[in-house]
Image: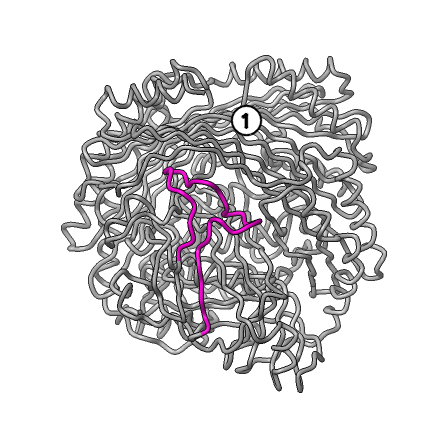
């Protein structure tokens, strides 16, 4: 395997696994009755541009070695960014010391049992791992050229990275793999307040058509010029994929986690209808159309979880802890220990529908076409009430056609009510980077969306 | 340390950098999380590494590594130069830095009780006592109690001869009681849901008296379950510092970041309504009693330091004076573009991130005359809003909406009916223009946030906000109703 940047000493999965086993032996020698080691290595680079020029350009090489040290039912976790022998010895000592004085975890289920993860296809692309600053700069120049051609400014970033993860535990888990991800996003800003957004994400950076991303955003910025004020109120909406990604992110955060259900913070109840029959939401880290991962950060094989099927709640995601307390197997959604936030769907997807994407707007008499949301936050978790703003292209639709650009609106909307009101789902989907993981989403049409305010002109 | 910094700077210079700086950072973090009597996590994390930033042909390059060796310094500096040359292929306005004297010296956060020297058992015990006190209150579904500490040892060296060393220590803690009934879930936190943090030692944690406050906080969470929902309307609101600090953060701090105003954060966080043409033009940001300053010298603030990550000395920069917009948070690159010198606001989240313009301590200055209690007593009809629950603001920092955990009716100067699910919304300059009372120094407190996100790759910043509580007229409330 070659390097992201010339001369870099990237750890491959085998080397990461060897390092994990070294720390495991140190923990066992220090008296651990159980131990789990996670090695996460990141080689990432990002080229950022604004005002149609590159203004930030960075590369980093980082490593994190985490040790979960168990002594009976007492658990200590320590981590280090150093890998020299002295640092690793101190890591085992620190984790052991924490475990020695920690309160017993009464319901400690033991570390997850070993289950070799079946390998996944399509999670690693050498072209992404080897992406150079010159390659990213070329992509950026293509975006800028599209913006120049449309008379707008280009802002955004092009990132490439490889993550190598290895887990070794005293229960016999041995899992290691490298995963790559690339993402190009851009905001185009034109005269007369026009803005547009476009994004592409892929395991293989060479699959990203930078010029096409640039053209999409630039065209939207041109069309969204001179927005007018529209009074807040309830409007039907077509949400483009970028906005739908926010639905999945927030629903995953407030509702589909084993911990949120355990703590009674979630709306989720098996068999409860929360959406129209068109709504099916899954988490599938093994789908080659997404960003595949064979196992989670506890070394447990990832499993497809159907969270909503035909609008009805089915399953939630678990890590080893929430699964044990619920009396079910882990679904392979654990985050690095210690993890007070619980498991999270990192590979969520909404099933495609049967409506051609361009017909979503065509089927709306009067409503709004929304490109994406900005700065959403939970107002009420159990009701999944979220507030946020529209951004980078909000359009009024009349008679099935876009008739003009609208100044950004604030919404305060229950995402559950929105799922119930889903009228149509596009037949194609886009792979995007969500808040925490990858999301695979279609555009949708929703019968009613509650806008509660509008922004102002400067 | 000099071996790494000197090699990186020499290599960068030899390979063509007109300017270079290097930061070597060692960071130690500790966190403890107790959930309903269960020790959910104790984490001790250490990381160290260095980052090299170079200017070549007027363009920036940056590279970093966790391997602290001279050979790695050579490699990383060379990569940074190569990246800068790639940047230069898409640069239209070469970077020009302001002139500042080389920085030299040492800074250390004043700490009375080293948080890393306090026995772990004691820290866990302090949290368990508070957790137990919350769960003794009938109706509490679950409780969460957290503690964190961070220490950063940072060496900065630049090709102009600057060399500084800093040791910066931050600590924070919070308790959170949750009550659930059917579809209703109510949370009460203290001092703040994200944890109140300061630049201090464990003495700050003791001063919070988490255990002594736990029962009251838990009782309020249960009371909220049966409280009516706040009805919509236009009301006078009085903001407690536990909400006001975040209002300052979102609607004052972020829009005064000069990189946002120049569009360099447009693709992620957005831009700012405070465009450079408004500076020096008498733009009215708020009422005449509103004075806001970015003060990197304020005691206890998480934005307090000796020098920023460009080697610019800590200073107090007025942002709003008597309600008029007068200044920005700035850097050596951005300040010359508005005819000024850097205000010293460049901060990086560790060794592997570039410095960005970040808030230091953006403080709403107290006003002599009325205490916060006096303001409530002076309010005939209004709401007293306490402790943030949710926040959101648009990409130019104009339209905001906040939710608070508590909302008390004020009638005839006295607190009355408790409401749940309180929200309020507004437009930034209109809102601050309606501010007609700010508390005096008696309720002035240094708060802040330890999770301010900005930049790509995302950086998490520790920033401070001092404030004392304030009153605003004719504000839309009850948006969720």
- Magenta-colored stretch includes residue B255: no
Tell me: B410 left or right of A359: right
Query: In the rendering, at what x and y percent does residue A362 appear?
Result: 32, 66
The answer to which image quadrant residue B466 occupies is bottom right
User: Percent x, y for residue A152?
Assistant: 19, 55
Would you say residue B310 sits in the magenta stretch?
A: yes
Q: Quadrant where the N terminus of chain A lies? A: top left
Please state the total of marks drawn on the protein image.
1
Q: Would you say B334 lies left or right of B245 here?
A: left
Placement of the C terminus of chain A among the 4 image quadrants: bottom left
Stretch in magenta: B289-317
- Inspect this view and state whether residue A396 appears: no
Characterize the local packing of mark 1: few (<14), some (14-19) or many (20 or more) Cα atoms within 10 angstroms. Answer: some
Q: Residue at x 63, y 74 (%)?
A: B384
Identify the image quadrant of residue A320. top right
Q: In which quarter of the image is residue B200?
A: top right
Name the chief secondary structure element in magenta.
Answer: loop
Which residue is at a point 75% across and 66% down the rendered structure image? B220
Residue at (49, 59) in percent of width and height = B363
> Can you say whether A449 is above or below A263 in the image?
below
Residue assigned mark 1 = A64
């Amino acid at each position: 395997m070659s390097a992201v940047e010339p001369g870099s000493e990237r750890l491959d999965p085998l080397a990461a696994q060897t390092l994990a086993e070294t720390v495991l032996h140190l923990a066992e020698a220090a008296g651990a009755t159980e131990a789990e080691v996670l090695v996460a290595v990141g080689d990432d680079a990002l080229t950022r541009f604004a005002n149609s020029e590159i203004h930030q350009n960075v590369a980093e090489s980082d490593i994190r070695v985490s040790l979960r040290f168990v002594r009976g039912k007492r658990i200590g976790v320590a981590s280090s960014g150093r890998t020299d022998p002295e640092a690793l010895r101190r890591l085992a000592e620190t984790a052991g010391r924490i475990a020695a004085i920690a309160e017993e975890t009464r319901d400690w289920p033991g570390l997850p049992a070993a289950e070799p993860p079946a390998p996944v296809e399509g999670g690693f692309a050498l072209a992404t791992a080897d992406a150079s600053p010159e390659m990213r700069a070329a992509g950026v120049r293509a975006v800028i050229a599209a913006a120049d051609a449309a008379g707008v400014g280009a802002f955004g970033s092009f990132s490439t990275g490889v993550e190598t993860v290895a887990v070794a535990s005293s229960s016999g888990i041995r899992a290691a793999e490298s995963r790559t991800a690339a993402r190009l996003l851009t905001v185009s800003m034109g005269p007369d307040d026009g803005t547009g957004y476009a994004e592409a994400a892929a395991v293989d950076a060479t699959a990203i058509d930078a010029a096409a991303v640039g053209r999409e955003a630039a065209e939207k910025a041109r069309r969204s010029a001179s927005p007018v004020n529209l009074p807040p109120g309830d409007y039907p909406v077509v949400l483009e994929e970028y906005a739908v990604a926010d639905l999945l992110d927030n629903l995953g955060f407030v509702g589909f986690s084993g911990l949120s259900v355990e703590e009674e913070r979630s709306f989720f109840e098996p068999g409860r209808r929360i959406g129209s029959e068109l709504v099916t939401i899954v988490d599938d880290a093994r789908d080659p159309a997404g960003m595949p991962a064979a196992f989670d950060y506890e070394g447990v094989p990832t499993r497809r979880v159907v969270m909503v099927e035909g609008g009805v709640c089915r399953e939630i995601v678990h890590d080893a802890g929430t699964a044990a307390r619920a009396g079910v197997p882990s679904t392979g959604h654990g985050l690095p220990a210690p993890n007070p936030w619980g498991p999270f769907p990192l590979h969520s997807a909404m099933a495609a529908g049967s409506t051609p994407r361009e017909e979503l707007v065509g089927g709306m008499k009067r409503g709004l076409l929304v490109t994406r949301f900005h700065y959403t936050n939970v107002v009420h978790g159990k009701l999944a009430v979220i507030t946020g703003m529209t951004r980078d292209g909000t359009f009024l639709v009349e008679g099935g056609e876009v008739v003009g650009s609208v100044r950004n609106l604030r919404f305060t909307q229950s995402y559950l009510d929105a799922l119930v009101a889903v009228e149509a789902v596009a037949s194609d989907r886009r792979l995007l980077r969500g808040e925490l993981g990858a999301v695979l989403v279609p555009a949708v049409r929703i019968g009613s969306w509650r806008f509660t305010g509008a922004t102002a002109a400067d | 340390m000099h071996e790494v910094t000197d090699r990186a700077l020499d290599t960068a210079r030899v390979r063509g950098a007109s300017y270079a700086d290097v930061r070597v950072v060692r960071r130690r973090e500790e966190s403890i999380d107790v959930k309903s009597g269960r020790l959910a996590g104790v984490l001790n994390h250490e990381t160290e590494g260095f980052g090299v930033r170079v200017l070549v042909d007027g363009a920036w390059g940056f590279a970093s590594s966790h391997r602290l060796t001279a050979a790695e310094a050579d490699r990383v500096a060379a990569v940074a130069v190569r990246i800068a040359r790639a940047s230069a292929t898409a640069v239209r306005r070469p970077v020009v830095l302001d002139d500042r004297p080389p920085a030299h010296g040492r800074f250390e956060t004043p700490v009375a009780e080293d948080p890393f020297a306090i026995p772990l058992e004691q820290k866990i015990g302090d949290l368990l006592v508070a957790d137990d006190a919350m769960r003794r209150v009938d109706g509490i579904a679950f409780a969460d109690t957290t503690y964190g500490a961070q220490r950063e040892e940072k060496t900065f060296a630049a090709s102009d001869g600057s060399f500084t060393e800093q040791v910066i220590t931050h600590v924070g803690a919070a308790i959170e009681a949750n009550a659930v009934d059917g579809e209703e879930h109510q949370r009460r936190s203290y001092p703040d849901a994200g944890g109140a943090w300061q630049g201090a030692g464990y003495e700050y944690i003791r001063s919070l008296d988490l255990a002594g406050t736990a029962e009251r906080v838990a009782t309020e969470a249960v009371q909220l379950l049966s409280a009516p929902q706040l009805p919509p309307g236009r009301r006078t609101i009085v903001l407690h510092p536990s909400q006001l600090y975040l209002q300052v953060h979102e609607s004052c701090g972020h829009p005064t970041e000069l990189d946002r105003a120049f569009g360099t954060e447009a693709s992620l966080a957005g831009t700012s309504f405070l465009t450079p043409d408004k500076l020096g033009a008498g733009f009215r940001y708020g009422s005449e009693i509103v004075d806001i300053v970015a003060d990197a010298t304020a005691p206890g603030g998480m934005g307090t330091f000796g020098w920023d990550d460009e080697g610019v000395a800590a200073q107090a920069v007025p942002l709003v004076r008597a309600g008029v917009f007068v200044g920005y948070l700035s850097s050596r690159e951005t300040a010359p573009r508005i005819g000024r010198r850097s205000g010293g606001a460049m901060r990086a989240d560790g060794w592997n991130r570039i410095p960005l313009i970040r808030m230091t301590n953006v403080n709403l200055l107290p006003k002599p005359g009325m205490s916060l209690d006096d303001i409530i007593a002076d309010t005939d009809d209004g709401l007293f809003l306490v402790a943030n629950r949710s926040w959101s603001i648009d990409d130019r920092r104009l339209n905001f909406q906040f939710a608070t955990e508590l909302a008390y009716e004020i009638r005839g100067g006295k607190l009355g009916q408790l409401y749940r699910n309180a929200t309020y919304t507004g437009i930034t300059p209109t809102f601050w223009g309606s501010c007609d009372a700010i508390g005096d120094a008696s309720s002035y407190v240094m708060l802040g946030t330890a999770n301010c996100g900005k930049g790509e790759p995302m950086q998490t910043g520790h920033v401070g906000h001092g404030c004392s509580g304030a009153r605003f007229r004719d504000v839309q409330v009850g948006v969720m109703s």
